[in-house]
Amino acid sequence: MKILKLTSLIGVLLFLACHKPKTETTEIEETPLKEVVEERPNQKLTIEQQIMSAILAAPAEVREGAKVYGYDSEGNFTTLRVGTNEMICIADDPNKEGFQVVAYHKELEPYMARGRALKAQGIGFPEHRDMREKEADEGKLQMPKNAATLHILSGKNAWFDTKSSEVRNASYRYVVYIPYATQESTGLSLEANAPGHPWLMFPGRANAHIMITPPIEADQ
């Protein structure tokens, strides 16, 4: 009887190990959000707090000189700080559910800015993603000449701790854009070999990119 129970347990564990969910998200609009018990209302941060929280998405060594976009008192998207280096950050949108700040290399700005413009016209995702890809193929939209990274720090119930100047209950995700990269040119798999492993999405297309989603810590 004990042997039968042990055999059944081993079978269940093997099934779970072989059926791990695959992450299909890629753009800023599709950030995967963590589930936690506590729910928090959207924060209304000051300009200074928006800047302090937005730059946390960027690597530490480039935060001080990063350009920062955010929102004014009426919720309009605007420039909060002019940058002096290659990094651009965006503060959390107080009118969107959850918390998300992002940072990306300036080489991605034409692609990101075009996405914002199309979204403002009421064009949804993935429609504006496909439109940008077509424009890039036609040479109308400039894409990065080299690999360029998008850093995303987000969480469904994440929030910015104004006392400690830290983003709580959030996790990172990275998207490294390499236009027209393929499995053959990168040596990457087209799906993650294990949790946290990099993989190539949209191979051979203008918006080809490497996805890296570090595993979420159990206590977060």
Image (tube, rainbow, N blue to C red):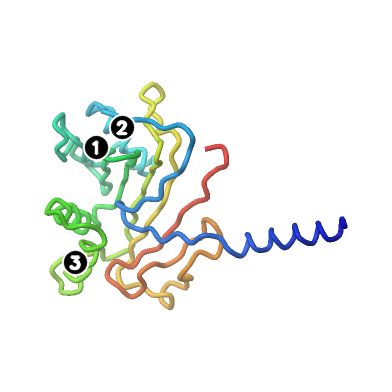
Q: Which mark is residue 132?
A: none
Neighbourhood count class around disc 3 (C-alpha, 10 Å): few under 14, some 14–19, many 20 upward: some
User: Is disc 3 in contact with disc 1, using a CB cutoff of under 8 Å?
Assistant: no
Q: Residue at x 40, y 63 (%)?
A: 210
Q: CA distance from mark 3 to mark 2?
A: 31 Å
Residue tagged 1? 95
Q: Position of residue 29 (x, y in %)?
A: 30, 52
Q: Please tell me whether mark 1 sits on a helix, a strand or a loop.
A: loop
Q: CA distance from mark 1 to mark 2?
A: 7 Å
Type of amino acid at the residue the image marks with label 3 = Met
- Height in image: 145 above or below 42? below
- In this view, the mark in front (3 or 2): 2
- In this view, the mark in front (3 or 1): 1
Q: Residue at x 36, y 49 (%)?
A: 151
Q: Earlier in the sequence, mark 3 or mark 2?
A: 2
119 relative position to 97: left or right: left
Quadrant of the rendered image containing residue 70: top left
Residue tagged 2? 42
- Height in image: 125 above or below 200? above
Residue tagged 3? 131
Q: Earlier in the sequence, mark 3 or mark 1?
A: 1
Q: Nearer the viewer, residue 43 or 139?
A: 43
- Height in image: 85 above or below 27? above
Q: Please tell me whether mark 3 sits on a helix, a strand or a loop.
A: helix
Q: Count the labels in the image.
A: 3
Type of amino acid at the residue the image marks with label 2 = Asn
- Height in image: 4 above or below 71? below
Q: Position of residue 95 (x, y in %)?
A: 24, 37
Quadrant of the rendered image containing residue 83: top left
Q: Position of residue 94 (x, y in %)?
A: 26, 35
Neighbourhood count class around disc 1 (C-alpha, 10 Å): few under 14, some 14–19, many 20 upward: few
